[in-house]
Image (tube, rainbow, N blue to C red):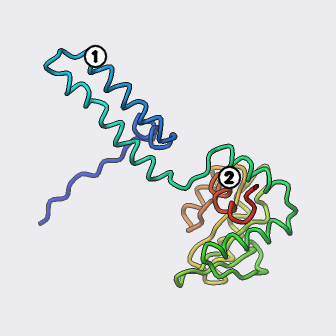
Amino acid sequence: MPVQLPSFKMSDKSLFAVLLRSPWWISFALAVAVGAACFKLFPDRFAVVGALSGLPFAVIGGIAMWKQRGTPNPARIDAILQKLSSLSARDFASALETAYAKDGYTVTKVTANGADLSITKAGRTALVNSKRWKAATHGIDPVRELSAAMEALDATQGIYLALNPLSETAQHFASKNSIRIVPRTQLALLMQSAVAPK
């Protein structure tokens, strides 16, 4: 019988988890600061070991830099979101179709209650609900409607666009029913190719 190793999950509140979500340069700055401080504070014979003590932060910085490659800075994301919020419903729908098409999806408009677009890539189809993307609140009803549309149209996944957070109940329902929530930052990343300010 094979030995099963225990799985470890990093806490979202741990220092390394926070650094992974922060701009990559913060980890490198910490690596230099910790290494320099330890180099000065350690006895001469351990100075090199002290200098290397910042290495874990440098590794986290490298991972964060890799994960954040190609991600626009926060100011650019805000500019994209402002541009999006100024669009009419028709212009937003058109920009959304363009963004998905540029990302390699085959895009089809649908008239099902709860879904606006059907997107297909690599043999997988997802339904997109974008009508309420600017709503101040998102309850469970539109998410349920999307789930019903998925069942009716035989889609493997649902995508719900939301500038503002969904209620806890709606989020729980979405996670249990193969519906991916696309919040504001991910929405800006998705739409940048279609509406990015010059």
Residue located at (61% from left, 51% from top): 72
Which amino acid lies under the numbered mark 1 shown in the image of this protein?
A: Lys
Report the front residue among 96 and 114: 96
Residue 93 found in image quarter: bottom right
Residue located at (16% from left, 21% from top): 46
Residue under label 2: 184
For the N terminus, the image quarter is bottom left
Residue 173 found in image quarter: bottom right
Apparent side of residue 157 relative to residue 15 in the rendered image (left or right) = right
Disc assigned to residue 77: none
Disc assigned to residue 40: 1
Where does residue 57 sit, x and y in percent of width and height? 36, 36
Q: 158 above or below 140? A: below
Label 2, residues with CA under 10 Å away: few <14, some 14-19, many ≥20:
some
Residue 5 found in image quarter: bottom left
Residue located at (72% from left, 76% from top): 117
Label 1, residues with CA under 10 Å away: few <14, some 14-19, many ≥20:
some
Where does residue 144 sit, x and y in percent of width and height? 68, 66
Q: Nearer the viewer, mark 1 or mark 2?
A: 1
Residue at mark 1 to residue at mark 2: CA–CA distance: 44 Å
Which amino acid lies under the numbered mark 2 shown in the image of this protein?
A: Arg
In the rendered structure, are the residues bearing label 1 and label 2 in contact, judged by CB atoms less than 8 Å apart? no
Report the front residue among 117 and 143: 117
Does dot 2 land on a helix, a strand or a loop? helix
Between discs 1 and 2, the one toward the N terminus: 1
Apparent side of residue 137 relative to residue 59 in the rendered image (left or right) = right
